[in-house]
Image: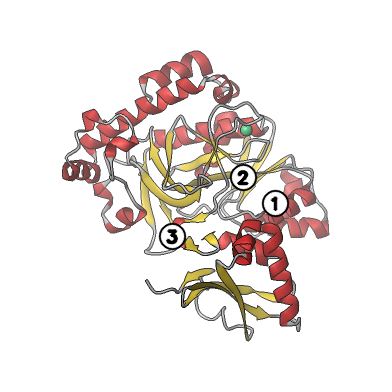
Amino acid sequence: MLGGLRNLVERVVIGDSVPALIRWGKRVPRSVIRGIQTDGFRKVVQYAARHQKFFARRLNESGIDPARVREPKDLGEIFTTPEDLLRLPPEEFLCREPQAVFETTGTSGGPKRVYFDYDELEFAGRYQAAAFYETGVRPGDRVVCTFDADYWISSWVTFLACRQMGVFCSAVGKPHPCDVYDRLGRYGYNVIVADPTWLVSLSEIAEKEGAFPIKLIFAAGDRMTDVYRTYVQEVWKAPVVLGYGSTEMGGGLGMECRQRDGFHVDEFNFLVEILDRDAEGYGELVVTTLSRRTMPFIRYRVRDVTRFIEEPCPCGATIRRIARIKGRRDEMVVMGAGNMYPEIFENVLHDVQGISDSWQVGVRQEGTHDILEFRLELSNGTSPAAVEASVEQNLSARYPDVWANRQCGMYRLEFRFLPAGTLAQGRKPRRLVDERGT
Ligand SMILES: [Zn+2]
């Protein structure tokens, strides 16, 4: 499975043991990593051209000779999209007989199905083990992983990572936090791996009943706000390290180091592009899987928006970092206030007193003016004026650029207060909606 150059690097520079493996980020010069990426990209393109119907057809339609492809831009407008995965049968992407399947639930259109073989899962575990080691997990530790098992991949990859390090691991699906809290002492777990909302529930129990000595906490799955992270860290007196990935990525694409400032990308197994970048470098994440051969993805459009962090990380790793995910590409609204994402309004509204959890921000247009309209439900008799003042204060303090655009008349801010329960009726409301005509 390994390309020639990486094979050599793994043997000579990295060595076989997991503790040695983690040195990859620290000893391998950028030029070697770039070489591994170029080599890996060329190989997976040629492989998929021969074995993957979907990619072969796209090459054919575009008149591109795979033998001439050296880097992503040589493929022009050829991408693989989540919509392609939903629309087409798996045979379009499968390059050989699979041994396992996982699913990923999307916001629309049913689950995407991704196939692997056992070697690929072991391999994903090996690189997750390297990330665990880097952040401080060692043999002798005891890990409890409560990622939802179901058809989701992360629980399995975490289990395989621990197995490769010889670390005790209970990957137990997603039980009620009470059930795990009761076992923390009994089994002596000192590392917790879980999704953010579950972690908050467990931490609320620990805040009342008492915390156990925990050394490290890993979170991934849905969005972990800074407020959640700070709370969980304070309850357990342990760092919360975030990972980023998906079933399409085969588990983890990247993980934070102990600096906790951006995800170090596993550049040995993934080539990452950031498309259509704005002035700050933010754009859509596009990922090519370099190592997988059962169902490789060439230039998969993840739809998440992030940017490269160009400065070297103080931890010394040479693999590049991407910033925390700013939002979904399909949720971005470009307007007078700037590029708006739901996350901005989560950060503005989460600590405003007197409103319910159900809220929505609409972007409307009146004449030539964009209007940012906050639709809020008052929850405990707080006056609308107090809520408005608090929203404006948070927006100006936390997003000065967005605020400055308002001061110079690029858009207007409006508020609509709705009876409790209005927004929560039916499905979960979309947080940010663009209602301007085209
Ligand atoms: Zn680092």
> Which one is closest to the eye, mark 2 or mark 3?
3
**Which residue is at the front of the view, 160 or 106?**
106
- Distance Cα–Cα, label 2 vs label 3: 23 Å
Q: Residues within 10 Å of mark 3 (few under 14, many from 20)?
A: few
Q: Is residue 312 left or right of residue 114?
A: right
* Quadrant (top left/top right/bottom left/bottom right) for the C terminus: bottom left
Q: Is residue 414 left or right of residue 281?
A: right
Whole-percent x, y for residue 377 in the image: 64, 80
Helix, strand or loop status at disc 2: strand
Q: Which residue is mark 1?
A: 229
**Which residue is at the front of the view, 243 or 157?**
243
* Quadrant (top left/top right/bottom left/bottom right) for the N terminus: top left
Q: Which residue is mark 3?
A: 330
Q: Earlier in the sequence, mark 1 or mark 3?
A: 1
Q: Earlier in the sequence, mark 2 or mark 1?
A: 1
Q: Residue at x 39, y 59 (%)?
A: 111
**Residue at the bottom extreme, as displayed:** 419
Q: What label sits on residue 242 in the rendered view?
A: 2
Q: Earlier in the sequence, mark 2 or mark 3?
A: 2
> Residue 390 lies in what quarter of the image?
bottom right
Helix, strand or loop status at disc 3: helix
**Which residue is at the front of the view, 333 or 194?**
333
Is the residue at mark 2 in contact range of ligand 1, meaning its CB lies under 8 Å from it?
Answer: no
What residue type is disc 2 on?
Leu
- Distance Cα–Cα, label 1 vs label 3: 26 Å
Q: Residues within 10 Å of mark 1 (few under 14, many from 20)?
A: some
Q: Residue at x 37, y 38 (%)?
A: 117
